[in-house]
Amino acid sequence: MEVSRRDFLRVSGAVATGTALGGLTGLGASLAPTLARAEELRIKNARTFPSICPYCSVGCATLVNTIDGKIVNIEGDPRSPHNEGTLCPKGAAIYQLHVNPNRPLKVLHRAAGATEWEVWDLERAMARVAELVKTTRDETFIERLDNGRRVNMTPAIFSLGGATLDNEWNHIQQKLMRGLGIVAIENQARI
Ligand code: SF4
């Protein structure tokens, strides 16, 4: 199609309340070839793997593109019947879950009253968590209420899950927590 200078200026003015893309498509310009080309370049030579966004129970389908074993792009899978290629802002930022220089890769421990974080190895941290859970549970465990009803629980430990805990993790987490007698269990990963 041809866009005259007058038309272009008119559309550019409209851009103040819209976007250049919206303006051009408003004139009937098809951006499909350009977008298709950009799409092709972005994932050229990439291998594509279907996956699922872990952030909530909607479970939107994603396509993970990799080059030489490294993730280069993640986007919604247009074949999915429920998200149809779209992702919410959290899901759209999922690439940063994997590729993120700000992501802590070591266990950090700050002792009570301390002002500085200390790097711990994972074994030491896990042993410390287990020790504190056992001590707290032993000290606060309630077998029966005053009326004699058996409850076998501790009100002193709270389990808080994060957005990236998936169904399988939560299944095991629930089993562990309930087995310990922990009843205060919460997780973000739900709608
Ligand atoms: S967080 Fe967003 S993109 Fe991810 S599954 Fe939920 S709705 Fe879908």
Image (spheres, grey):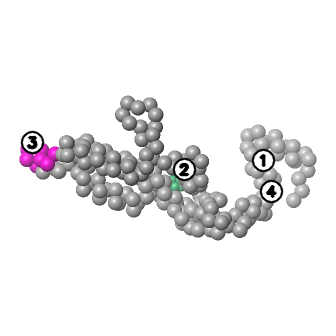
Number of numbered markers: 4
Q: Nearer the viewer, residue 36 or 137?
A: 137
> Is residue 66 in sight in this rendering?
yes
The reply to whether the magenta stretch includes residue 147 is yes
The reply to whether the magenta stretch includes residue 35 is no
- For the residue with label 2, is its CB less than 8 Å from the closest atom of ligand 1? yes
Q: Nearer the viewer, residue 86 or 107?
A: 107
x, y percentage for residue 84? Answer: 58, 62
Q: Which residue is mark 3?
A: 146
Secondary structure beneath label 4: loop
The amino acid type, in three-letter code, at marker 2 is Lys
x, y percentage for residue 69? Answer: 62, 65
Q: Which residue is mark 1?
A: 20
Cα–Cα span, label 1 and label 3: 71 Å
Disc nearer the start of the sequence (2/1): 1
Which residue is located at x 12 percent, y 44 percent? 145
Asked if the residue under mark 1 is in contact with the one under mark 2, i.e. CB atoms within 8 Å, the reply is no
Asked if the residue under mark 3 is in contact with the one under mark 1, i.e. CB atoms within 8 Å, the reply is no
Crowd rating for badge 3 (residues with CA inside 10 Å; few <14, some 14–19, many 20+):
few
Magenta: predominant secondary structure element?
Answer: loop
Crowd rating for badge 1 (residues with CA inside 10 Å; few <14, some 14–19, many 20+):
some
Q: Which residue is mark 4?
A: 28
Secondary structure beneath label 1: helix
Cα–Cα span, label 4 and label 2: 33 Å
Name the front one of labels 2 and 1.
Answer: 2
Q: Which residue is mark 2?
A: 90
- Tell me, for residue 124, which label it has, or none: none
Cα–Cα span, label 4 and label 3: 76 Å
Q: Quadrant of residue 118?
A: top left
Secondary structure beneath label 2: helix
Which residue is located at x 62 percent, y 62 percent? 70
